[in-house]
Image: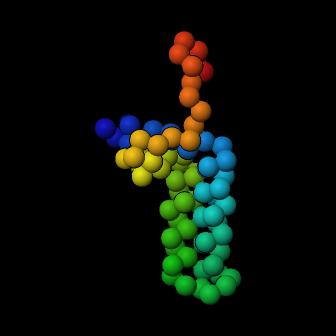
Amino acid sequence: MSSRFLATNECGPDRAMRIILGVFLLSLLFWGPKTPWALAGLVPLLTGVVGSCPLYSLLGISTCPMRKAGTGG
């Protein structure tokens, strides 16, 4: 089950958006309102770096393009 749970289910733009959002939210700890809520930026940052979203796995969602059967890549 853990291999399915941590399977890559985010690709390209989805990962980039998560990383950018995570960095932005974490930057609020240093600039801006300096609220502890900025730590919520760790979630999109980590899921973007890893390429796997646990919520996507539970819901069966993937933003990765479908691979054609019989291709090696």
Dividing the picture into quarters, in which one does residue 3 lie?
A: top left
Q: Is residue 17 above or below residue 41?
A: above
Please count the marks in the image: 0
Q: Is residue 11 above or below residue 32?
A: above
Q: Residue at x 51, y 40 (%)?
A: 62
Observer able to see residue 49:
yes
The percent coordinates of residue 10 (x first, y second) are: 55, 44
Of residues 72 and 55, the one drawn nearer to the viewer in this rendering:
55
Of residues 68 and 51, the one drawn nearer to the viewer in this rendering:
68
Dividing the picture into quarters, in which one does residue 32 lie?
A: bottom right
Query: Residue 57 vs residue 62: left or right?
Result: left
Q: Is residue 25 above or below residue 50?
A: below
The percent coordinates of residue 41 (x first, y second) are: 55, 68
Query: Residue 6 vs residue 23: left or right?
Result: left
Q: Residue at x 45, y 38 (%)?
A: 7
The percent coordinates of residue 36 (x first, y second) are: 51, 82
Observer able to see residue 6:
no
The percent coordinates of residue 65 (x first, y second) are: 59, 33
Residue at the extreme bottom: 33
Of residues 66 and 49, the one drawn nearer to the viewer in this rendering:
66
Dividing the picture into quarters, in which one does residue 26 lie?
A: bottom right
Residue at the extreme left: 1
Q: Residue at x 50, y 62 (%)?
A: 43
Q: Residue at x 60, y 21 (%)?
A: 73
Query: Residue 60 vs residue 36: left or right?
Result: left
Q: How is the image coloured?
A: rainbow
Of residues 52 and 67, the one drawn nearer to the viewer in this rendering:
67
Rendered-image quadrant of the N terminus: top left
